[in-house]
Every structure is written in C-alpha cells, then in structure tokens.
Image (tube, helix red, strand yellow):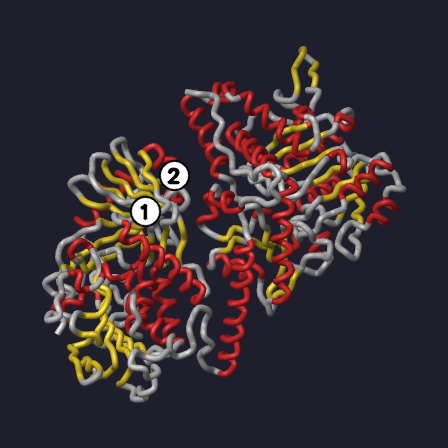
C-alpha cells in the first residue's frame, strides 16, 4: 500500500484571479447537493477531498494498525502544523493540535495558573464556554473579572479597554467574531493596547479563522484558539491553538501528558519546548489529517479571496433582509463577517429555522444563554443565524430572501382570512392567476357557470391528475376533479410516504423529460412553500456480466468498492458494478399530493372524491361524463386513472397489465446507516429474482424497499394486506444488501403498477379524439414526472404542442384512430 497519498485538492483560482470558482467549489462539496447550507458558523460542509483524506487513513488503520498507520503518515501530520502556522503567521513549533477550541481555551487558561488577585479583562463578545470558565475561576480561584462594554457600533469600547488596562491585569481576552452576530472586533487595536500595558492577549478565533485573515503578529496575540469544524471546513473533533514563545515561558500545563513531556528520572520530567506540551497522546490521526487537508485548501484559495466572497454575500443578505416584511436584522452596526442574524416578527426563531429547513435551508438559532454579555445585554432571547461560505452563491442568498418573502405573504394572507373566517385565496408563488384562452378562442370559464359543467374534467387524483388539475385551474380553467375513492385511499399507485427521482435512465430519449421533471419539482416547491425533493444521490447496481443498464447526464459507473465508499449502508459484493447518479433523491410523496390538492383548491378546483366514472362519450363540441352522482359535461376530458385506464379507455385494455407491488419500511438500531448521506436511492438487479429498489430512511420513516415486479391483479378487488411470504422475501433481500437492517418492519404497503409495453408511458391526445387527453401506464416509474406531465397536459388541453413528448404519444403504443373512438 502506498503511503504517499496526496488526494486531489479542491479547485483553487488561477493566480491573479480575483474571484472564487464557486461552481467548482460547490461541485467538490457533496453536502451542497442536499440543501442551501448556511450554517458554516456551526459546522461548515467539508470538501470531498477532506472526507477522502479521513476515510483513507481510517482504512489504513484497519489494515496496518493505528500506530503503524500514524508512523507511515508522520510526514503528512507534520504538514498540518506547518499549514496552521502559515495561516496564523506563526512558526510550526508554536502550534498545538487539540480536539476543539474549548479544549484549547481550557488548556491555555489552566497553564496560566491564575489565582487570587489575578485580573482578567474580557470583551462582551466572549463565547459561552469561555465565559463559563471565567466565571468558575472567579468562583473557585478568586480571580477578578471585568467585562469591557461594547460601544455604539457593537464592538469593544477601546477607550474603556484602555482605562481598564490602567489597573494591573493578567490577561485580556476577546472573540474576533462572536457566535451571536456578524460583528468583527478591532483585534489589532485591542492587541496593541494590551501589548502596551504588558498584558498577554488570548484571541478566540473560532468564528474568524478561515473566513478572515488572522495574523498573530498584526493582532499582537499571545494565545489563539480555534476550531476545525467552522470556517476552516475541517472535521468535527479538531481544533488548534497558538501559544507564543513569550507566554510559554510561564504557562506550564497543569496535567502534562506523554505527548507533551518526557519522564527523565524517577521524580523528574521536562515539558516539550514548543506548544505541543499542551497536547495529549491520544487523538484521532484521521481527523487531524482531514484538518490538514482543509487548511491546505484554505491556503490554496487564499483567505483574502474567501473574505471578499463571504463578506460580499453577507452584505447582500444584510441589505435585503430589512426589505422583507416582518423581518428584523439583529446584527450590530459593526457587523462585517459572513454571519448574519435576524428575527421574524412574533415568531420563535426555532420555528423560523424549522420552516426554512423544510424548504431546504440549513440555518440555526443562537440563544441568549450562549452570549449573555451580548444578546442578554441587548434584550434578545434568541436569534436566527445564517452563515455563508465559499460554496454559497448569490443564488443561495436570493433563494433565502424569496423564501422569507413568500412565507410572510402566505402568513399575512392566512391571518387575514382567519380573521374573516374564510379560506385564504391569494395565489401562491408559482401559480398563474390570469385566465388563458381555451383552444377554441373562448376564455376558460366563460361558459361554465353550471355546477355540472366545466372547461375540463380530470379523472384520477393521483400525482398526474392532481398536477394537471392544479395547472389547468391556475391558467383560468374551471376544473372538476374526480376520483372513485375517498381522498387518502391506498388502492392506487400514488399513496405512501416516498418515491424516487433520478437522472439515470436506460436511454437518452428520456433525458429531456427528466430535466423538465427536476425543474417542475422546483416550481412546485416554490408554489407549495416547502421542500418536497431531497437530493441524496443514487446507486443502481447490476452484475458486471449483465448487458444494458442505466446511464445519464452526470452519472458514472463505479465498482463495488467505490459503491461502498459512496453508500456504506448498501452492501454489494464483488461481481457487481453500479451507476452513480449524484442528483438522484427522495420525493416526499405524501406531502406532494397534499400540496397539489391544496394548490388546486386555492385555484378553485372542484374536487369530488368517492365519485366513480361509469363512462364517457363525445357530445357535440365537448365530452359527456357519466358518474355515480350524475352527468357532467366539459369541453375536454383528461384521464389519469392509473390501474383503471383500461376500464375507461378500452383501447388500452389489451396493452396494459396491472400488477401488485409490495413495499416494506424497515428500521434499525443503526438508523444512520439507512439515512442520507450513508444511504441514498438505490436498486440492485438480483439474478433469478428481479430488481430490488430502495429509498433511504426519510422524514421519520424507515428505509423503503420493494421488488419492481409482481403478480397480475384485478384493480376492482381490494389489494389486501402484505402476506407473510411477501414480507419474508423482502426481508431476506434486505439482510443480503442492507447490513444495518435488523428485521424491524415499521410499515408494510401494497400498491399497483400499470405496466405498458417496454415500460413506456402514453401521454397525449387519444388517437382520433382530440377532446380526450391521457397520461397512463406509468410502469412503476412515473411519479417523478408528476408535476411535469401535469403541466404538459395543461399545455395540450390549451391546444399547445409538446413535441418533446412525441416519443410517449398514445400512437407510439400502437393505438389507432379507430381505437380511440
């Protein structure tokens, strides 16, 4: 095994360029596929290279042993000290690697051995863990503690600091950037005052190192503490400290360790000359190497470039938030870092964060208990905190502002409606409120005042029918929407918790429609005001000897070993390969149907559940539909009836086959192995059995698995529960490919696939009958296209052309004009 592992680094800008290549940085950051991550001040997203460094060393430890692996990569560990020193403008011997910024703080403070009469001067921006330590030293060691007030701009009052230092002090400490706002303290000026008074300065650079320049010479810092997980983009469980030569002369560790001291005789030991005297022997070498990679990436990008990018984005967000109704910026005037804090009127910040998280934004809150000298003094109980980094772009900022604006509009509308005692009627974002003309030149709704007349009747309330009804109503059509069963039934194909979305398909003929589908889901999310699709990545495996398989834009073929690295929760043996689709993911099916129903209702869709269609026929210039509740008439009929398509459109009866499908949701005591990012969407072609597919644990439900085939079933008969034989068959397959499952079945589901020849769809006008449109026979892979096909049906109903769907026309399934009559 080679020990000269030098992984590819995150792309850095070419020399002389002023801007970061954000697209490349996003592509090299796997977590950016899943959400708008705006929580770098909590824990930034690491790069793929950092992750690879960590996992590779863990693999070496598993093969060589921990001591041997550390010895083999000792030169690279030394590079970590050199990289940290370069970033701080220090010497490598001044650097210690520790587990966290708090660990660094505590070891530095303990080494100073403060006692009665020692006076510590602290800024109001001091972090909670540091403040707690100072308060405990005040209680137990009788130190004196003075907190310097902030000036009008929020920064430490330098005049007050200068006055405080006229009295002898043992230490000055301040946070460069606090956890509670985007404030940037004047550390160089404060350091100069401390140096002039002969008092050492302890700088907490936890929230600044990696986003702002930190130079120990310019700041006159004697001690610097920082973490790896924030703006350095390193792994959790890493930190570093700088201890200058001057302060090391009198700062001895209170608990020396074999890493930082040498036992020289029976009753004598010597501490190491450098800062490593503060380290302990036991540490995670894998994490430290990961920190080294993150440090090298930061140096490669250039801290000044990072600062310019991050602060520009933060300024964009700070400038936009005051224009969002109901939002108040809580940053002090001197805020100039990548952290932004705000509040929504009359709303707990935790609720704000929960709602934004449902829309795909990763933010957090900071309570006053994390900053009493700052938030507490300003009367703020808790704030929402967004924090930006190199993988964020103006699009992320604008999306957050749009989400806040959209939510405020909906909240105001709902509140006003509630006060009036009626339903909200304001169009939701993404809907069309201006009526469009029907293909006959008569505006939708112009001649449909009768309750039993409509512009369009849509049959079927699954994902395609519900989407078509919403899109048509949003364009001004009067829509009657029918389903033979009550809302929420489980006899069709669209119920259940989750569905899969992917770009990987057998043929490029699907690529355009797949791309349209991804865009349509984004539009639906905007209209619904919530996240419906979660990108997890996908692996679609088959024996290496099998022919055919999936491919697609952005996809690559990987062997079973690489598949294990991508999804540790999926076990493939040698002899399997897989297509990796980084854009694959999970659709919240239940939420999607609920959103479509709500959006349709808001646009005036007349939804009639539990109303079966008995038949239909052409009548004059329109269509007559006979139902259990009477006769309905419309200009057009859209059939999205799933398993009942052949019953309503006899021409399809001989070409379609309805089959029974069984799904299980499985749990585990090691649930993290069944959730993203350790498991994503997947399928495995199992010889002599069929295609096993799965959707990772999502939204509180366990991992979902099923086989992509089943016995023929009569849709007029209730599907019935999952049998014991069906259950055992799936559990056996789960035990083979999902090592974390323990046999716990959380939920069992039956549904129906309506299969067509070659697993294709039929979307378009019924041959010979331009007044009837159909979306049918989605062959088990149609849910992902729901919003896209709904919009397509609305286009066609308006008389528009959709040549991109010609390959799915009913005629392509062999239906003739006579068959449609």
Question: Which of 609 and 759 lies nearest the eye of the viewer?
Answer: 759
Residue highlighted by disc 1: 552
Q: What secondary structure is marked by label 2?
A: helix
Q: Residue at x 24, y 73 (%)?
A: 638
Relative vertical location of residue 719 with respect to residue 675 in this rendering, above or below: below
**Which residue is nearer to you in this view: 650 or 599?**
650
Residue positioned 45% across, 24% down in the render: 61
Report the residue marked by disc 2. 566
Residue at the far top in the pictured view: 265
Q: How dense is the environment of label 2, judged by Cα within 10 Å: few (below 14), some, or many (20 and up)?
A: some
Relative image position of residue 220 (x, y in whole percent): 78, 35
Query: Which mark is first along the chain, 2 or 1?
Result: 1
> Is residue 143 something one can see in this rendering?
no
Q: Quadrant of residue 498?
A: bottom left
The image shows residue 321 at horizontal and vertical percentages of 61, 62
Q: Nearer the viewer, residue 537 or 713?
A: 537
């Amino acid at each position: 095994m080679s020990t000269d592992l030098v992984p590819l680094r995150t792309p850095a800008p070419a020399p002389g360029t002023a801007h970061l290549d954000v697209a490349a940085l996003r592509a090299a950051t796997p977590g950016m596929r899943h959400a708008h991550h705006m929580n770098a001040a909590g824990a930034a997203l690491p790069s793929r290279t950092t992750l690879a460094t960590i996992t590779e060393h863990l693999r070496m430890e598993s093969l060589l042993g921990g001591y041997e692996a550390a010895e083999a990569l000792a030169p690279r560990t030394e590079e970590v000290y050199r990289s940290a020193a370069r970033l701080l403008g220090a010497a490598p011997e001044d650097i210690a690697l520790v587990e966290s910024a708090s660990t660094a703080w505590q070891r530095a403070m303990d080494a100073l051995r403060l006692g009665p009469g020692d006076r510590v001067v602290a800024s109001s921006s001091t972090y909670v863990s540091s403040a707690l330590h100072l308060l405990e030293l005040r209680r137990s060691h009788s130190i004196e503690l003075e907190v310097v007030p902030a000036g009008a701009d929020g920064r430490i009052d330098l005049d007050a600091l200068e006055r405080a230092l006229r009295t002898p002090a043992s230490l000055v400490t301040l946070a460069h950037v606090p956890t509670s706002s985007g404030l940037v303290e004047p550390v160089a000026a404060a350091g100069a005052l401390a140096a002039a008074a002969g008092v050492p300065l302890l700088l907490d650079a936890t929230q600044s190192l990696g986003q702002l320049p930190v130079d120990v010479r310019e700041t006159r810092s004697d001690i610097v503490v920082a973490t790896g997980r924030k703006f350095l983009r390193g792994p959790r469980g890493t930190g570093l400290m700088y201890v200058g030569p001057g302060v090391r002369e009198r700062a001895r560790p209170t608990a020396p360790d074999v890493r930082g001291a040498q036992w020289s005789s029976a009753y004598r030991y010597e501490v190491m000359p450098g800062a490593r005297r503060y380290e302990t022997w036991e540490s995670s070498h894998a994490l430290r190497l990961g920190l080294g990679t993150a440090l090298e990436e930061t140096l490669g990008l250039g801290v000044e470039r990072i600062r310019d990018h991050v602060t520009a984005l933060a300024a964009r967000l700070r400038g936009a938030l005051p224009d969002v109704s109901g939002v108040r910026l809580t940053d002090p005037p001197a805020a100039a870092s990548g952290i932004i804090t705000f509040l929504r009127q009359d709303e707990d910040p935790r609720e704000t964060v929960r709602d934004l998280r449902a829309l795909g934004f990763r933010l957090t809150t900071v309570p006053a208990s994390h900053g009493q000298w700052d938030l507490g003094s300003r009367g703020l109980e808790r704030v929402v905190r967004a924090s930006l980094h190199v993988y964020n772009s103006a699009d992320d900022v604008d999306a957050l502002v749009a989400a806040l604006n959209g939510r405020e509009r909906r909240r105001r509308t709902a509140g006003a409606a509630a006060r009036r005692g009626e339903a909200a009627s304001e169009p939701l974002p993404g809907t069309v409120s201006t009526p469009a003309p029907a293909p006959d030149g008569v505006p939708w709704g112009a001649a449909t005042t009768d309750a039993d007349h409509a512009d369009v009747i849509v049959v079927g309330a699954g994902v395609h029918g519900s989407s078509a009804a919403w899109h048509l109503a949003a364009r001004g059509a009067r829509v009657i929407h029918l389903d033979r069963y009550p809302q929420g039934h489980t006899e069709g194909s669209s119920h259940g918790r989750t569905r899969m979305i992917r770009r990987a398909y057998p043929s490029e003929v699907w690529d355009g429609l797949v791309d349209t589908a991804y865009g349509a889901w984004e539009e639906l999310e905007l209209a619904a005001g919530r996240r419906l699709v979660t990108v997890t990545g996908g692996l679609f495996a088959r024996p290496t000897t099998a022919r055919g398989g999936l491919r697609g834009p952005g996809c690559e073929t990987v062997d079973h070993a690489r598949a294990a690295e991508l999804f540790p929760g999926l076990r493939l043996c040698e002899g399997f390969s897989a297509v990796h689709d980084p854009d694959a993911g999970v659709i919240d099916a239940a939420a999607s149907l609920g959103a479509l129903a709500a959006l349709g209702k808001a646009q005036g869709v007349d939804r009639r559940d539990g109303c079966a269609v008995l038949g239909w026929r052409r009548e004059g210039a329109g269509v007559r539909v006979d139902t259990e509740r009477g006769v309905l008439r419309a200009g057009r009929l859209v059939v999205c009836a799933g398993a009942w398509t052949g019953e309503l459109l006899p021409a399809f009866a001989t070409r379609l086959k309805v089959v029974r499908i069984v799904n299980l949701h499985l749990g585990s005591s090691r649930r993290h192995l069944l959730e993203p990012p350790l498991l994503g969407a997947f399928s495995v072609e199992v010889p002599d059995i069929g295609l096993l597919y799965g959707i990772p644990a999502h939204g509180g439900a366990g991992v979902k698995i099923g086989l992509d085939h089943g016995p023929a079933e009569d849709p007029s008969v209730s599907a019935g529960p999952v049998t014991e034989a069906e259950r055992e068959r799936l559990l056996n397959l789960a035990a083979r490919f999902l090592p974390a499952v323990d046999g716990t079945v959380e939920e069992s589901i039956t549904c129906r696939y309506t299969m067509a020849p070659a697993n294709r769809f039929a979307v378009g006008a019924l041959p010979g009958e331009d007044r009837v449109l159909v979306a049918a026979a989605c062959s088990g892979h149609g849910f992902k296209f729901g919003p896209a096909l709904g919009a397509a049906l609305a286009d066609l109903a308006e008389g528009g052309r959709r040549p991109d769907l010609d390959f799915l026309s009913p005629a392509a399934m062999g239906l003739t004009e006579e068959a449609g009559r």
